[in-house]
Amino acid sequence: MRTLSLNRTALRGVATAAVASLAVSLTVCGGDSDAATRTKTDAAGTVTVGALSNGAAKEATLKVSEVKSISAELPKSVAERGTLVVGIGALPAGSPPLNFVGQDQKTLTGSEPDLGKLVAAVLGLKPVVKNSTWENLFVGVDSGKVDVAFSNVTDTEERKKKYEFASYRQDNLAFEVPKKSTWNFDGDYRNLVGQTVAVGAGTNQEKILLEWRDKLAKSGKKLTVKYYQDNNATALALNSGKIDASFGPNPAVAYHVTQNAKSPHPTRNAGQFSGAGATIQGLIAATAKKDSGLAKPVADAVNYLIKNGQYAKWLAAWNLSNEAVETSQVNPPGLPLDNS
């Protein structure tokens, strides 16, 4: 599952520097920990998103209550328990804006746990968030200790052998440029001619970028690829004009743009590309154990949130509106076996 692991490695690398700037930390407790989703309880019929984000999101309180026709689809064991155990793989460093420790330095926040809370509300369940390492996230799902993972998991055909999915976000890469730049990707690698672009070594985005570079070289055109030690060094290179753009996971770019908005060097998103490549739109999906019976009610809950506007408000709060899906699908086509 090379594509997925490389994407996540890149996002984690970006997140490490971001978390340092937020002055927060996560404590590893045997690779797994319980995590509060908020320091105070939301009022009945409401879910607060973007809480304690230290500027990474715009906090919003959304009205959402149980939908009986959807909660009736839940497996009997989950319905009787009354809780939805949501798995997040944020240890040890987190990945803003997806999942990280908030400004109180103890509460897990981010777009992923927020969606878990929203889905739980539609299902009439109390969300219980379990935070772990990425590897232990899947151990939790396999063992039944976690009902469903909301943790930037890409839908792949390889993973369908063990898990069932309910898609909720596009899996995209993006170009970050200075706000004053007039360059845009526009979905066409030929627009990279003459550009100097930074990318993380050993990542999925590097693989894609180098393929584009080689295609351009065959027609006598040049794309220059640069590498830097960390995210801070890349930002300095972008600010100083040593590079024209950087290429990385779209959520990380969204986070940078938000954080840089009021700085002397604001940036913007100059275009996206599917993390799965040109032939298929990659999808991020809620992940449950295969044949658990959870994918259908979770997808229906997400579709309820889409139809009634809470989904769009959730994405907007985290500056991720450009990863919206029109509908949540159960086990949609995923990354093929030869690119999983």
Image (cartoon, rainbow, N blue to C red):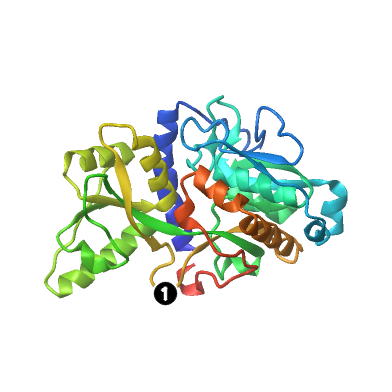
Q: Is residue 290 left or right of residue 335?
A: right
Q: Position of residue 12 (x, y in %)?
A: 44, 44
Residue 306 visible in the snapshot = yes
Residue 200 in sight here: no
* Image quadrant in which you'd find residue 275: bottom left
- Left or right: 118 in relation to 284: right
Q: In the rendered view, would you say 67 is above or below 264?
A: below
The structure residue drawn at horizontal position 23% and vertical position 53%, both measured from the top left corner, is 197
Residue 296 position, x and y percent, is 72, 64
104 above or below 322?
A: above
- Judge from the rendering whether residue 243 lies leftward or rightward of residue 66; answer left or right: left
Quarter of the image for residue 72 reads: bottom right
Residue 249 or residue 312, whichever sits in front: 312
Instruction: State the image coordinates of residue 46 (x, y, percent, origin top left).
Output: 70, 40
User: Is residue 81 toward the left or the right of residue 187 in the image?
Assistant: right
State the residue at coordinates (35%, 58%): 205
Question: Badge 1 local density, few (<14 within 10 Å), some, or many (20+)?
Answer: few
Q: How many marks?
A: 1
In the image, 299 versus 181, the foreground residue is 181
* Residue drawn at 25 percent across, 50 percent down: 245
Q: Which residue is labeled 1 in the image?
A: 279
Who is closer to the viewer here, 305 or 15? 305
Q: Quadrant of residue 290?
A: bottom right
Q: Residue at x 54, y 70 (%)?
A: 334
Please say if 330 is above or below 183: below
Q: Secondary structure at mark 1?
A: loop
Residue type at mark 1 is: Thr
Q: Position of residue 299 (x, y in %)?
A: 67, 62
Which residue is outermost to the left? Answer: 220
